[in-house]
Amino acid sequence: MFHMRSVTVRELRQHFPRVEARLRRGETLEIRKRNKPVARLVPMSAKPLVRPDFEASAKRIFGDRITKLTGTEIVAEERKPY
């Protein structure tokens, strides 16, 4: 059976670096006040945020073509009739 570790509100306030270290190790902690559970701290996933490579996408779509107008100017040109 899984037993969740707990810390008190006082411990959390006075020894946050220790609590943070436990979270970084992957521990889920129950926060207690007057021996009653009030919250649960769950560690963030260790998966790094992956951002799309817009430059590579643009190169794949447009190749080495260089336009004389910016995207904003192209949209403005297209909207003129309306």
Image: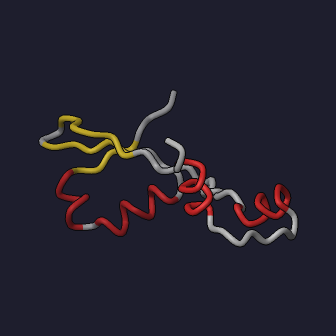
Residue at left offset 12%, top offset 41%: 34
Considering every residue shown, the one lying at the far front of the view is: 81
x then y, percent, for residue 33? 15, 43
Q: Which is more toward the observer, 80 or 36?
A: 80
Residue at left offset 30%, top offset 65%: 16
Is 15 above or below relative to 77? below
Is 81 above or below relative to 16? above
Considering every residue shown, the one lying at the far top of the view is: 1
Q: Which is more toward the observer, 42 or 4?
A: 42
x then y, percent, for residue 43? 47, 50
The chosen color scheme is secondary structure
Is 82 above or below relative to 20? above
60 relative position to 18: left or right: right
Count the labels in the image. 0
x then y, percent, for residue 49? 60, 57
78 relative position to 13: left or right: right
Residue at left offset 73%, top offset 66%: 55
1 relative position to 12: left or right: right
x then y, percent, for residue 71? 62, 61
Residue 12, quarter of picture: bottom left
32 relative position to 78: left or right: left
Residue at left offset 58%, top offset 54%: 75
Residue 69, quarter of picture: bottom right
